[in-house]
Image: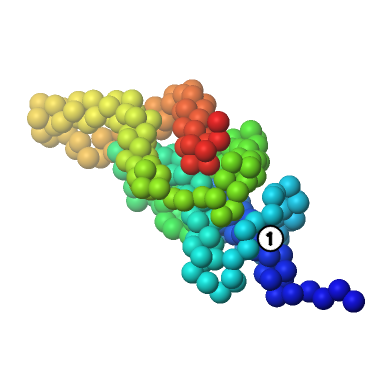
């Protein structure tokens, strides 16, 4: 009768647990699937099913003691890959949310806020509108499937136990914050500049005719102009979506060392 040793059980568990950690970390942090709208149980089941499909294609892993520092470091590396990849695309989504915040504050809609069910925070109505529209376009072009495909390809270039998170990669992830603010500002700059000209015009009017109630006239006029300019800006929404998504996938390929 063939007996199963402890080392064989450890090797079997590591063969499945390390890929499951990387896939699960991505599904817990990526846009759309990683939001509160999708239950955690569904994400865990999806990660488990993807792991069952990926593991047979991987070479045997190096066996390490289950309760050891080496195994903990391997698990941490797998978590870093999935979290960094999901965080990178969360930053892409936050560009549009931040752009909506900029426009709402400039138009006077900063007080019109609502609860964001995907993240559980308060955002302006305009930010929520941008986020919903971006989510629908992202799903329509199968962006979530492309992101999962990149992660599955990473098991060929970065198999478990063969990854080290370098300082350059850490700075690359940190620099995404500056890129997010700059991209959101570039996206909203035409509308914000136009509203600045409108506010300057009302300032001149208030100096030329002090008896006019500029606050009563300026607020609705600025709001109407802002909504009209936002409507005109939808013509460039596709261009910004393609540009920022291309940057996001470029970051993912560099992180996963895909050619």
SS state under label 1? helix
x, y percent for residue 57: 73, 47
- Residue at position x 71%, y 65% from top? 12
Q: How many marks?
A: 1
x, y percent for residue 25: 56, 57
Q: Quadrant of the C terminus?
A: top right
- Considering every residue shown, the one lying at the far right of the view is 1
Pick the residue in front: 141 or 125. 141
Pick the residue in front: 113 or 153. 153
- Residue at position x 55%, y 35% from top? 258
Q: Quadrant of residue 147?
A: top right
Q: Quadrant of residue 135?
A: top right
Is 215 above or below relative to 22?
A: above
Is 36 above or below relative to 229?
A: below
Pick the residue in front: 248 or 98. 248
Answer left or right for 71 relative to 100.
Answer: right
Q: Quadrant of residue 106?
A: top left
Is 25 above or below relative to 13?
A: above
Q: Is residue 12 visible?
A: yes
x, y percent for residue 72: 51, 66
Pick the residue in front: 83 or 236. 83
Q: Is residue 42 visible?
A: no
Residue bearing mark 1: 16
Answer left or right for 153 relative to 109.
Answer: right
- Rate crowding at label 1 as few (under 14), some (14 to 19) or many (20 or more) other CA atoms within 10 Å: some
- Residue at position x 39%, y 27% from top? 229
Q: Quadrant of the N terminus?
A: bottom right
Q: How is the image coloured?
A: rainbow
Is 145 above or below relative to 14?
A: above
x, y percent for residue 158: 57, 45
């Amino acid at each position: 009768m063939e007996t199963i040793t402890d080392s064989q059980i450890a090797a079997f568990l590591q063969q499945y647990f390390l890929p499951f950690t990387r896939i699960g970390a991505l599904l817990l942090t990526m846009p759309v699937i990683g939001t509160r709208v999708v239950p955690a149980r569904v994400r865990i089941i999806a990660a488990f099913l993807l792991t069952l499909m990926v593991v047979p294609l991987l070479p045997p892993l190096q066996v390490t003691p289950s309760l050891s520092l080496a195994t903990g470091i391997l698990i941490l590396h797998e978590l870093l890959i999935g979290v960094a990849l999901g965080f990178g695309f969360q930053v892409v989504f936050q560009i549009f949310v931040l752009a909506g915040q900029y426009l709402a504050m400039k138009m006077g809609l900063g007080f019109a806020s609502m609860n964001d069910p995907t993240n559980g925070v308060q955002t302006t109505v305009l930010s929520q509108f941008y986020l919903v529209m971006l989510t629908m376009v992202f799903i329509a072009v199968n962006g979530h499937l492309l992101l999962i495909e990149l992660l599955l390809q990473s098991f060929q270039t970065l198999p478990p136990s063969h990854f080290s998170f370098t300082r350059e990669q850490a700075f690359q992830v940190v620099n995404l914050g500056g890129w997010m603010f700059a991209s959101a500002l570039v996206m909203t700059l035409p509308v914000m500049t136009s509203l600045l000209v409108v506010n300057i015009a009302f300032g001149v009017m208030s100096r030329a005719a002090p008896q006019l109630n500029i606050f009563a006239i300026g607020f609705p006029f600025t709001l109407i102009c802002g909504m009209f300019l936002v409507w005109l800006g939808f013509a460039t929404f596709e261009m910004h979506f393609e540009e920022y998504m291309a940057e996001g996938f470029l970051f993912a390929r560099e992180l996963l060392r895909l050619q």
